[in-house]
Image: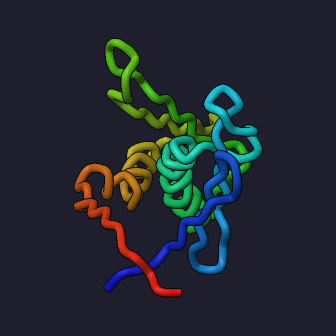
């Protein structure tokens, strides 16, 4: 079984992805020849890690009627020596003083359920081909 995402040009350095009724727009920064009108694809990749963890963290809290207003996740990307690529991504779940201490470790476990993180750790195979399509 597979899901299909359609990638199209948005003109210039813009590239869009249509998937499940949504259009995800990307652009390159002005520094990289784009207009900077939308996030760059790599930025979306990084955001998908933190937001995926957030889904699990906030759901955990909501199931226990713990307010989420003052809970945030700070994600940091640590570059490899020499500055090429990322060596480590760290997520810090920041909670208010009155957050139940007994749930601190459980929040970490919840964040680690993130499907994006799991797919990075157990990477899928990639296949890229070119086909001629009759119009």
Decide if residue 41 is in sight here: yes
Question: With 109 as the anchor, is 53 left or right in this view?
Answer: right
Q: x, y percentage for residue 47?
A: 55, 46
Question: With 49 as the anchor, is 25 left or right in this view?
Answer: right
| In-front residue for pair 29/3 | 29
Looking at the rendering, in which quadrant would you find the N terminus?
Answer: bottom left
| In-front residue for pair 135/56 | 135
Decide if residue 100 is in sight here: no
Q: Residue at x 56, y 52 (%)?
A: 51
Q: Is residue 52 above or below residue 72?
A: below
The way the protein has been coloured in the rendering is rainbow
Q: x, y percentage for residue 94?
A: 57, 36
Q: Is residue 24 above or below residue 103?
A: below
Q: x, y percentage for residue 119?
A: 32, 57
Q: x, y percentage for residue 15?
A: 61, 55
| In-front residue for pair 8/107 | 8
Q: Residue at x 35, y 12 (%)?
A: 82
Count of picture labels? 0
Q: Residue at x 49, y 48 (%)?
A: 45
Q: Is residue 53 above or below residue 91?
A: below
Based on the displayed image, in which of its 4 quarters is residue 78 positioned?
A: top left
Q: Residue at x 64, y 40 (%)?
A: 28
What is the residue that sits farthest to the top in this orientation?
82
| In-front residue for pair 66/76 | 76
């Amino acid at each position: 079984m597979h899901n299909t995402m359609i990638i199209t040009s948005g003109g210039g350095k813009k590239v869009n992805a249509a998937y499940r009724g949504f259009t995800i727009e990307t652009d390159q920064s002005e520094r990289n020849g784009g207009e900077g009108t939308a996030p760059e694809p790599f930025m979306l990749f990084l955001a998908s890690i933190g937001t995926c963890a957030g889904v699990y963290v906030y759901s955990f809290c909501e199931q226990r009627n713990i307010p989420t207003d003052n809970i945030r996740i700070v994600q940091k990307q640590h570059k490899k020596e020499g500055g090429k690529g990322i060596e480590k991504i760290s997520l810090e779940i920041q909670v208010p003083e009155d957050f139940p201490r007994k749930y601190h470790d459980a929040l970490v476990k919840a964040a680690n359920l993130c499907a994006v993180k799991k797919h990075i750790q157990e990477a899928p195979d990639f296949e890229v081909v070119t086909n001629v399509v009759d119009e």
